[in-house]
């Protein structure tokens, strides 16, 4: 189950700022994103996601560069940061039954180009 969350600014990053061990184990991936200047606290959309995980629901925040910051909804800890696939971004809106905003298509194009050039989904 997925819910769109209307908090669309960097305040989400301020509320959810603690990190998990899972994220710390992916420091190489985060460094690569940082080196490419993809890390940004400018959130364009957030979705509350229920994957029936033992640790509870998640908040997936998509930033302006197409990265997905995955937080535990209850603990507010940052679990991981993922380089999105364009289909994944589109699916968030489709499942929430929200028309995909026009500006998202440009981000999806950038994500596709970066994935082809740098294979960021396998970092």
Image (cartoon, rainbow, N blue to C red):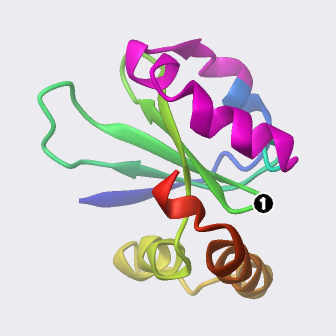
Crowd band around label 1 with a 10 angstrom C-alpha radius: few (<14), some (14–19), many (20+): many
User: What residue lies at 50% left-to-right and 29% top-to-bottom?
Assistant: 26
Q: Report the residue marked by disc 1.
A: 65
Q: Quadrant of residue 32?
A: top right
Where residue 95 appears, as percent x and y from the top left, is 35, 76
> Which residues lie in the magenta part?
14-37
Q: Is residue 1 left or right of residue 104?
A: left
Q: Count the numbered circles shown.
A: 1
User: What residue lies at 65% left-to-right and 35% top-to-bottom?
Assistant: 30
Q: Please tell me whether residue 57 belongs to the stretch shown in magenta.
A: no
**Nearer the observer, 44 or 7:** 44
Secondary structure mainly formed by the magenta segment: helix
Q: Is residue 109 above or below residue 52?
A: below
Q: Is residue 108 left or right of residue 51?
A: right
Q: Is residue 29 left or right of residue 48?
A: right
Where residue 41 appears, as percent x and y from the top left, is 80, 38
Q: Is residue 50 above or below residue 74?
A: below
Q: Is residue 29 above or below residue 66?
A: above
Q: Is residue 117 left or right of residue 48?
A: right
User: What residue lies at 36% left-to-right and 21% top-to-bottom?
Assistant: 74
Where residue 66 appears, as percent x and y from the top left, is 69, 62
Q: Is residue 72 above or below residue 50?
A: above
User: What residue lies at 56% left-to-right and 87% top-to-bottom?
Assistant: 99
**On the rendered image, what quadrant is the N terminus found in?**
bottom left
Give the SS element for disc 1.
loop
Where residue 58 appears, as percent x and y from the top left, is 36, 38
């Amino acid at each position: 189950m997925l819910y769109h969350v209307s908090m669309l600014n960097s305040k989400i990053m301020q509320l959810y700022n603690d990190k998990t061990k899972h994220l710390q184990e992916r420091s190489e991936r985060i460094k690569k994103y940082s080196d490419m200047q993809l890390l940004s606290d400018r959130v364009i959309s957030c979705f509350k996601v229920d994957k029936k995980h033992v640790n509870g629901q998640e908040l997936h925040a998509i930033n302006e560069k197409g990265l997905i910051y995955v937080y535990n909804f209850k603990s507010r800890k940052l679990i991981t940061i993922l380089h999105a696939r364009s289909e994944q971004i589109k699916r968030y809106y489709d499942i929430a039954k929200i028309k995909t905003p026009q500006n998202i298509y440009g981000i999806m194009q950038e994500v596709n180009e970066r994935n082809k050039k740098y294979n960021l989904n396998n970092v």
